[in-house]
Image (spheres, rainbow, N blue to C red):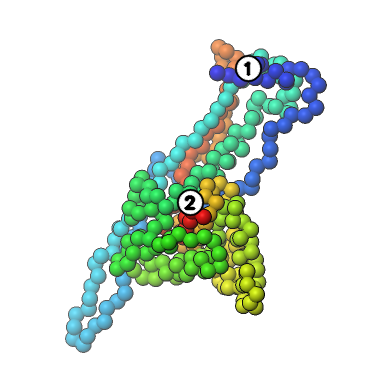
Amino acid sequence: MAITTSQIPALLLPGIRKIKGDYAQIKTQWSQVFAQYHSDMAFERTESMRYLPLPQLKGSGQATQFDNLAGQRYTYNHLHLAIGLGYSFTREAIDDNLYKSQFDPANLGLLKSFKQMKEILGAAVFNTGNVLNSTIGADNVALFSTAHPVDGYNIANTPSIQVGLNENTLLMGNNMIRRFRDNAGLLIGAQSTKLLVPVELRHVAKRLMETPLRPGTANNDVGSVKENDDLRDGYLVMDFFTSPYAWFLLSDQGGFIYLERVPFETSMQVDFTTDNLLVKAYERYYLGYDDWRAGWGTFPTN
């Protein structure tokens, strides 16, 4: 049903000083986490390959060991989501509205709505990262797991006991990222680049990341968090994280991706039979990941 004059009775009369309800929005956050690409396909896949392992010792006169296990290991599925929203105004509601410049029937904030949806979907990759999403496929464990299978190892990108954010646990997360391996079991030299925290942990993150000496102690030790090569991109407060305690690290290996299939678009028309103004918007994209080595996370409950 269209928006009618009964839904905007105050706008039909003179004397309104100001119309409020259109507020400033948070700055874009998802784009600081997800690398952006264009997509021309209905859905896309990323193939995770296994390359060669360590060489073997060769005794005098003995044959060289051959390894013929290289090839495809895991498939990450990227299914685009179609996002849409619209509304309609009656002709009378448009004609009789005395405040069109402030409450514009042709612009009720579709762009803001779509921007916030993207923030929610981007944050959801982390919010649900400890739950297996079988549609993605990959290695059949959750994004953040203690048991990512590679040759000869189970690699963790979450601790076996979930931990809150402090100096020791932050350094532990940095170190665990340094132990990431490829599918053949070789160390890959990964490093953490950025800390992601919910609103509730923003002050903890600031103390940890910006204190030149060890935070929370009387010692004169150098603050290892600030002074080493990890976390060169600082920290980012994510307003749409749902847990007040969960926190995450991004790695320099990349893997959190945004695939744009159809960019944001709007259309508008007047219905011939009713004279209603119809306005709608649409976009289509994928927000997710193509490698668990993209990050490390923990989900404490307090």
Instruction: Say if 265 sits above or below 171 in the image.
Output: above
Q: Residue at x 51, y 52 (%)?
A: 34
Q: x, y percentage for residue 190?
A: 46, 67
Q: Give the secondary structure at mark 1.
A: loop
Q: x, y percentage for residue 99?
A: 74, 23
Q: Residue at x 29, y 76 (%)?
A: 55
Q: Which residue is drawn at 48% across and 65% down?
A: 173
Residue 276 visible to the viewer: yes
C-alpha distance separating marks 2 and 1? 41 Å
Q: x, y percentage for residue 204?
A: 61, 60
Q: x, y percentage for residue 19?
A: 74, 29
Instruction: Check disc 1 and give the amino acid type.
Output: Thr
Instruction: Say if 145 sits above or below 137 in the image.
Output: below
Q: Which of marks 2 and 1 is in front?
A: 2
Q: Give the secondary structure at mark 2.
A: helix
Query: Is residue 217 shown left or right of residue 137?
Result: right
Quadrant including the N terminus: top right
Pick whichever, 112 or 11, lies toward us.
11
| Neighbours of disc 1 within 10 Å: few (<14), some (14-19), many (20+) | some
Instruction: Say if 28 sits above or below 282 in the image.
Output: below
Instruction: Say if 186 sits above or below 197 in the image.
Output: below
Q: Mark 1 points at which residue?
A: 4
| Neighbours of disc 2 within 10 Å: few (<14), some (14-19), many (20+) | many
Identify the mark at residue 29; answer none if there is no mark.
none
Sequence-wise first label, 2 or 1: 1
Q: Mark 2 points at which residue?
A: 126
Pick whichever, 92 or 179, lies toward us.
179
Query: Residue farthest to the bottom?
Result: 60
Q: Which residue is drawn at 30% across and 66% down?
A: 151
